Amino acid sequence: MKAKVYDQIKTLVEVQPDFADQMIPKNTLGTIVECYENPEGYAVDIAIPNQKLVGSYEYVNVILTSDIMSG
């Protein structure tokens, strides 16, 4: 998958973020905010539903590879 900044993606598997306790569920939507070429990777802002928060989402930034996301 060759994606670019501002592309919307969906996670194909559950993802454990580096700086959060909660798993990111499969099929969660996110937006690419930065692309890396060597090795290929993407910084993605993920919106996780959370009804306890105003706006009903919390946001996490994770680095993903193309094998765990679809465009």
Image: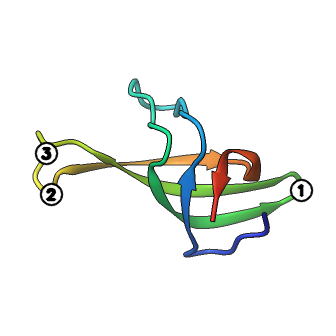
Amino acid found under the numbered disc labelled 1 = Asn
Q: Residue at x 10, y 52 (%)?
A: 54
Q: CA distance from mark 2 to mark 3?
A: 6 Å
Q: Which residue is mark 3?
A: 53
Q: Local crowd at mark 1 within 10 Å, few (<14), some, or many (≥20)? A: few
Q: Nearer the viewer, residue 68 or 33?
A: 68
Name the element at disc 1: loop
Name the element at disc 2: loop
Q: Nearer the viewer, residue 61 or 2?
A: 2
Amino acid found under the numbered disc labelled 2 = Gly
Q: Which residue is mark 1?
A: 38
Q: Residue at x 11, y 39 (%)?
A: 52
Q: Earlier in the sequence, mark 1 or mark 3?
A: 1
CB atoms of marks 2 and 1 within 8 Å: no
Q: CA distance from mark 1 to mark 3?
A: 37 Å
Q: Residue at x 57, y 65 (%)?
A: 32
Q: Nearer the viewer, residue 66 or 5?
A: 66
**Residue 70 pos. (x, y %):** 64, 58
Work out whether 40 lies above or below 48. Answer: below
**Residue 37 pos. (x, y %):** 85, 62
- Name, please, the residue furthest toward the right: 38
Name the element at disc 3: loop
CB atoms of marks 2 and 3 within 8 Å: yes
**Drawn side of residue 42 relative to residue 38, left or right:** left
Residue 4: mark in rendering: none
Residue 55: mark in rendering: 2
